[in-house]
Amino acid sequence: MKRPAVRMLLTLALLAAPATRVLATILTFETQPAAASNSPMPQDYGDGVSAASMPAAEGARENLYLEGNGWTPNVTVAYATERAGEFPHYTLTTEWPGACWLWSPSFRTGLPISSDAGAMPSGFEYRVTFTPAPGSNRGVVLNSFVLDDRAGYFDAVAHQVQWRVARGTAAGAVLASGSATFANGENVVVQTGLTGTEPDNEPVVLVIKRIAGTEDDLALDDIDFDEMGFSTASYNIGSLGAAADGVNAPGVVLNQPGAVAAGGDHSSHYAGGSNTTVPFLEELNPPSDSPFTIEFWARPEAWDNDDAPVFNRVSDGDRSGWVFFQRGEAEGWNFRMYDGVGSDVGWDLTGGPYTMNTWNHVVAVWNGSEPELFVNGQSVDTTNADGKSGNFLASATATFSVGAYDNGGTPFTGQLDEVAFYRTALTGAQILKHFQTALGVGAGTYSPLVRSDGAVLYLQQNPPTLDIALTGGEPTLTFTGKLSQSATLGTWTDLPVFSPYTVPAVGRPENNFFRVRR
């Protein structure tokens, strides 16, 4: 029986919002004046490439080998082989005007250049790594590259090359792959199929492996890649879906180390008033006598006694809603609820001493009549401060903000992660389980717990990833972010499922395509 095809559109995580594309940069290796043949390539490129990058005797010139539509200062390009200390070489001759030779002199020590004895071994890999600047919210998409065979050697065996584009490292998740065969004097343009996709900000690695061929004159040229801005939205994976997506202000730095101990968890960094805002939603502002829970992880780096990591208050006139404050390390975390009378505070709870530059799990629970504050899985305060009214007025207009007030005031400095809002009052046992699960090493266990406990807002902050494998003959998807499915590549449907997800056999379309978003 023919098994229905289960394919991923691209293993590159696809984000929901359009990318900001800059003009393609073409790395050509074809420059004038001529540089010495077979000289080691520098390990950087762009405006910084100058004679100082290489020994002057080897003919280095400023702006040595970049042509195309301008510089790409947010991306570093590095070259390597699988043998330590070896790098590709470039050449400029009238016969072959500029290319990056994929071979090393050490293979041919003492041998003429036309000798087969020192040829690059079959199975040998060369790598080109494109690394976006950390914190730049930029990424790289590799569109195409050219593989050349130098004419004149009358190769008896055509070149056979395997290539792949990987995320992070040469051994990372494969974004695209293929093979190419070409004979004496031929060159081929290899299209990766990634054109128009959206990146994340991990390095992108082009790996080229020689499988067969008579000579080692294989060369790489005309690498066409885009530097792109990836989406800076904080996508909601709670039950409210895209309606509760957060908008990140400039200065929010994504993809920082996260609070959850398992690998692959990320957070966002806030400072100077940068914030993530979610417009007013009734679902995030239930009636005053209805229960709710707010949960987040915070890693503070500074303190001035007026730092607001999470905010949902109307500040002008009669105040309504609530806000968290980070107080001094010995005092702890402060949760305030407002009663609709001027600037009066209805409830004021404080507790949970902390240490700077460490992660803290902070939760406030409103049961419909009184609040309770939890820090690191433990209840730390239920007693209202003196002189407070004990009343609460839910907001009818407040903007939900992470990292500072909605206007950027009272900023928090540090990392925030796993911000969640529930329309129920979580129990102490549930909160303790969340805290303990985050500290465990089981990958992918914390997020399903938050969602199964009913989070309507959940800003997980992880860059989306997706892997497909066969488990017991059935396709199983392991992912972060929100999983979507399509049978046509035209219409996508978000799936209300947790990772790992086994695609059900019943009703499975002939073609399943999957993608994920933050």
Image (cartoon, grey):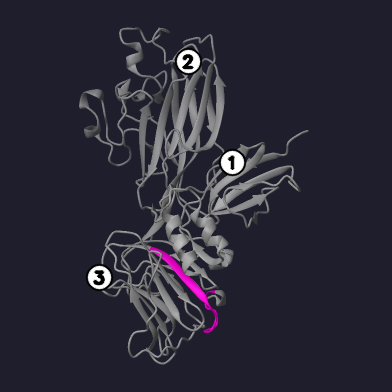
Number of marks drawn:
3
Q: Where residue 350 is drawn, which disc sits there?
A: none
Whole-angstrom CA distance, mark 2 to mark 1, is 42 Å
Q: Position of residue 444 (x, y in %)?
A: 50, 50
Q: Is residue 28 above or below residue 123?
A: below
Answer whether residue 8 is magenta in the image: no
Whether residue 237 appears in this view of the structure is: no
Mark 2 and mark 1 lie on one chain; the one further toward the N terminus is: 2
Q: Position of residue 289 (x, y in %)?
A: 53, 84
- Name which residue lies at 26% across and 65% down: 302
Residue named by callout 1: 468
> Which label lies toward us, 3 or 1?
3
Q: Amino acid at mark 3?
A: Ala
In magenta, the rendered stretch is 284-297
Query: At which x and y percent is residue 361?
Result: 39, 64
- Mark drawn on residue 151: 2
Amino acid type at circle 1 is Ile
Check whether the beta carbons of the residues at disc 2 and disc 1 lie within 8 A of each other: no
From the viewer's perspective, is residue 332 above or below residue 1? below
Looking at the picture, does residue 170 appear above or below residue 120?
below
Give the SS element for disc 1.
strand
